[in-house]
């Protein structure tokens, strides 16, 4: 009997999680079934409870349910608490556990590119949930300074206030998107600009050595500008695979090699 896993979201058709997890299972010799579950916007909690009641082992959570998943868990990992969102669920001792593997997925993807994070200065564009989820793992990986740039400065400032205590070893700073400047080892685009087709204009006086786009599979003006400057770039497929590997490892106790799937 295959172990049952699923990804839950709304919409869900676009998810590549099943193909990734089946590829991991094939590589590690495990017998699993991983399906997509569309939950009604007002029916997330019931859908999760039904899945585990039917013997499900683990569940990934995607848009727009990560905050609801966080609220539903009885036990949370440290990184999930800091992220305020959960993308990985499992049942243990009759209690729903939650983790957030997005940030570690990003760190693993960056390491797979052989870009160093040790003692680096990073700029993250965007101050939404995606940014909140990656700051703690980035600092754990050795980043010493993170500047968060956002259209609405107050939102970036609030994120700094919320997360400062969680990352005492790093410097966190907020700036308005219009005031972008400085010299960074890495710039990460955590906005939905490439998904919505918006142009993100990087000023000339902004210097950086690497550029990472969290989205994948869409044209990105952010990456186009980085390539025009002859800077090494990557889109977010590695992060997607990285977070999936982290979830797979939590559930199955075995960790596939990220580079095998890029």
Image: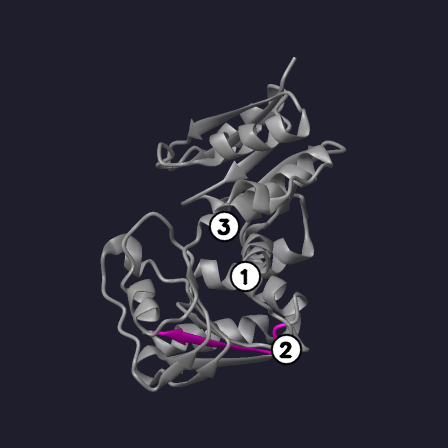
Relative depth, front residue between 187 and 56: 187
Q: Is 252 rendered above or below residue 74?
A: above
Residue 146 on the magenta span: yes
Q: Is residue 152 visible?
A: yes
The residue tagged with tag 3: helix, strand or loop? helix
Q: Where is mark 1, residue-wise? A: 134
Q: Where is mark 3, residue-wise? A: 238
Which of marks 2 and 3 precedes in the sequence? 2
How far apart marks 1 and 2 lie (CA) works out to 16 Å
Which of marks 1 and 3 precedes in the sequence? 1
Rendered residue at 23%/65% (across/down): 199
**Crowd band around label 2 with a 10 angstrom C-alpha radius: few (<14), some (14–19), many (20+):** some
Relative depth, front residue between 210 and 54: 210
**Crowd band around label 3 with a 10 angstrom C-alpha radius: few (<14), some (14–19), many (20+):** many
Rendered residue at 41%/36% (across/down): 15
Q: Which mark is residue 31?
A: none
Q: Report the magenta stretch's main SS.
A: strand
The residue tagged with tag 1: helix, strand or loop? helix
Residues at circles 3 and 2 in contact by the CB criterion of under 8 Å:
no
Residue 247, percent from left and from top: 61, 41
Which residue occupies the extreme right position in the image?
A: 93
Residue 48, percent from left and from top: 54, 31
Which of marks 2 and 1 precedes in the sequence? 2
Magenta stretch, residue numbers: 143-150
Rendered residue at 48%/63% (across/down): 131
Q: Where is mark 2, residue-wise? A: 119
In the shown orientation, is residue 185 left or right of residue 126? right
Q: Is residue 95 visible?
A: no
Nearest to the eye among marks 1 and 2: give it. 2
In the shown orientation, is residue 75 left or right of residue 215? right
């Amino acid at each position: 009997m295959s172990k049952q896993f699923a990804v839950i979201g709304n919409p869900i058709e676009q998810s590549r999680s099943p193909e990734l997890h089946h590829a991991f299972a094939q590589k590690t010799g495990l017998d699993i079934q991983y399906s997509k579950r569309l939950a009604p916007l007002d029916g997330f909690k019931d859908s999760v409870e039904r899945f585990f009641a039917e013997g499900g082992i683990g569940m990934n959570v995607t848009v727009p349910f990560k905050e609801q998943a966080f609220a539903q868990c009885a036990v949370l990992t440290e990184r999930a608490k800091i992220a305020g969102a959960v993308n990985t669920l499992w049942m243990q001792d009759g209690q729903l556990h939650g983790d957030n593997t997005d940030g570690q997925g990003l760190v693993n993807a960056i390491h797979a590119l052989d870009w160093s994070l040790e003692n680096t200065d990073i700029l993250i564009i965007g101050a939404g949930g995606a940014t909140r989820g990656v700051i703690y793992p980035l600092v754990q990986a050795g980043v010493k300074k993170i500047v968060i740039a956002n259209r609405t400065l107050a939102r970036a400032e609030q994120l700094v206030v919320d997360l400062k205590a969680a990352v005492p070893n790093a410097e966190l700073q907020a700036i308005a998107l219009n005031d972008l400047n400085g010299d960074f080892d890495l710039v990460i685009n955590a906005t939905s600009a490439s998904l919505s087709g918006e142009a993100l204009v990087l000023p000339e006086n902004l210097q950086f050595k690497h550029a990472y786009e969290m989205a994948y599979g869409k044209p990105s003006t952010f990456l186009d500008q980085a390539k025009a400057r002859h800077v090494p770039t990557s889109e977010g497929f590695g992060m997607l695979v990285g977070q999936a590997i982290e979830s797979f490892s939590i559930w199955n106790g075995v960790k596939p090699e990220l580079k095998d799937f890029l």
